Image: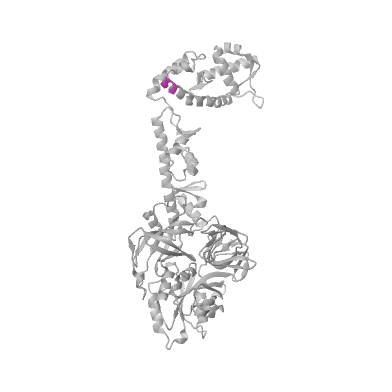
Amino acid sequence: MSVKNFILATAGHVDHGKSALVKALTGTDPDRLPEEKARGITIDLGFAHLELYPPASCPSASRLHLAIVDVPGHEDFVKNMIAGVGSLDIALLIVAADDGWMPQTEEHTQILACMGITRAVVALTKADLLTTNGDAILADIRAKLRGTPFAEAPLVKTSAVTGQGLDELKTTLAGLLTDAPTQPDIGKPRLLVDRAFAIKGAGTVVTGVLTGGVLHREQTVVVQPGGATARIRAIQSHHQDAASIGPGTRTALNLPELTIKRKGRVEPGDSIVQRGDTITLPELGRASHTLDAWIERSARPLEGRANMARPLESGAMVRVHHGCGNFSARITLLDAAELAPGTRSLARLRAGHPVFVFIGDRFIVRDWSGQVTLAGGVVLNMDVGHDRPPAKPDPEWLRQRAESPEQVAVFVKSELARAGAARRSALLVQSRFSAAAISECLAQLTTQGAAISKGDWLSDAAWWKILRQRAVDAIDAEHRAHPEHAGLSLSDLRAKLEDVPHLAEMFDALLSDLCKEAFIQAGAAIRRITHRPTLPPRLQGAGAKLRAALSAKPFEPPSRRELTPDTLAQQALRFLVETREAVEISDEIVLPAENLDRAKNIIRQYLRAHGSATVSELRQAVGSSRRILVPLLEYLDRAGITLRQGDRRVLRSAPSGNETSPRDASLNADCGCRNASAKTSAA
């Protein structure tokens, strides 16, 4: 028979028989501390386990394994109670027949509701003390449950002394849990540490409820929020060794590399673990000082606790209970100056030290002294930027999340809308949503056109459209301001978009998108396909003079000094070189590209016909002077067209033995002139 694992926690007023009922059900006394034995009340968390079989009507159903967490009921130990109910599947709400509904019954019920618990069984303990059938007490309990998630919870009369109702209670629990879903494996394991102790010969052991995923023996884990790493040497669940363990189980991990924090004393270099820490995987995020959340106060009064009715003021210091620990924080309300019972608000919590939470986690807010439960909340966002001030909260953005805190699509869309772009593998890693659910949502958004996929990066479609338009506007502005330029340099485009988050990672994708249509990348610049560089009006006169001077004697142009007597002429010549209308043969010689091609063809034909030639012979063939031809031949040597052998030139052969093709030679010549072009630009 397969096994389904569930976590059950008790709740209820002090001295209502929670521990006695657990012992009667399981045979295990959850009160393990000497002080608990001496005082006769539960002070800290106690643990037991219970095996249940499915009802006779479901013979093929799974066997049920309940890990039981017994919590203290005294008002002084509410923080320990909250530590025990952070990850349960079902609550066992205890009400004593001789007392009925009491203040801690109410407070515990409110805490369970704030933690999102919806499944419970009510056990009326000490039923053997009833002088009548107890209908009035049951009716009162049912009235008190009205308006809570447990209004329809089954009620069972029990007695730990006589055994009354124990079988019925087991049957009721089995009936509720047989078809109930177990805690999901979302691939994000977190062990919420409720105990840390040392065993001689083994070292440090931590226990707690494992949620969110599977842990394996020999796996490397990290202790959050401290950041210490360790390797799991052994795993147990209810004294049974295991190679791996899944969610919804009470788990013990042997982590000998860690040190237990004792009485606040920490030695330098110690890797500390204590109650309230989380054992998780290194890739699942970091701790944060700043949390944005949705908090709500119960409208239900608590008898004898008038101070619970006081408004919670913005700016107040509070204690926030999360997981098995708690931390101090300053709360800033975003919707009002104060939060009265029965109202809710967005809030920012600034913790006194880093805390490790997931988006979607629930928590409890108590007053600074830890005496009064004020509100419950759910984490909507956290800021993990330790090297910068936290971003200003965006109430509208947070309100979208608060309306549907369980829907992955809401969080994915809002995350992309806020960040603009995000790496697929890192999106909402620190959340209660699985990678599969996030990927499925991203696929739907991409299909719908709401998101755009760029390799491992995704962007919000509206954000990408704005980014692309900014790039287009920058390129067009460059064309208008400098029509002589080949385009906008990529470095200038980066500078104009430097305020865009994740630009470094998205820049190549942006260029690729632009070049799909209407734009082309040319070297270190980008331009419209239709753009043809032209001289601006102020340089057109100088350009006309240059063209005339270079064309007057095709193979005997003036020197650079003669061509550029002033700044305008220098700028015009730079334009002709950058647009390849003219080619720099040397620092002093510039030829129109058309005349250079003619000269190359003449030299090729002469060398094909004669095999080799001197400078003088080639000078006569071209009809030029030695001042021009010597730099021209050196240029052709660099371009791989000719080869100098002593005082003669021959055509250079390609590696295959064939003569370099005109196209290859032209490409080589272009490459060879880039350094010269750079010199012109620098001038």
Task: Answer yes or no: is residue 510 visible.
Answer: yes
Q: How many numbered discs?
A: 0
Horizontally, is 343 left or right of 291 in the view? Answer: left
Q: Position of residue 406 (x, y in %)?
A: 44, 61
Read off the magenta span: 566-571
Q: Which quarter of the rendering shows the N terminus? A: bottom right
Task: Answer yes or no: is residue 170 visible.
Answer: no
Q: Nearer the viewer, residue 612 or 356?
A: 356
Image position of 456 with respect to 332: above or below: above
Image position of 448 with respect to 87: above or below: above
Report the residue at 38% width, 57% height from top: 399
- Residue projecting furthest to the bottom: 131
Q: Nearer the viewer, residue 293 or 41?
A: 41
Q: Position of residue 647 (x, y in %)?
A: 64, 15
Q: Position of residue 43 (x, y in %)?
A: 49, 74
Reply yes or no: does residue 59 show up in magenta: no
In which image quadrant can residue 537 be found? Answer: top left
- Residue projecting furthest to the right: 657
Kindly report the secondary structure that dominates the magenta region of the rendered protein: helix
Q: Nearer the viewer, residue 378 or 400?
A: 378
Image position of 253 with respect to 136: above or below: above
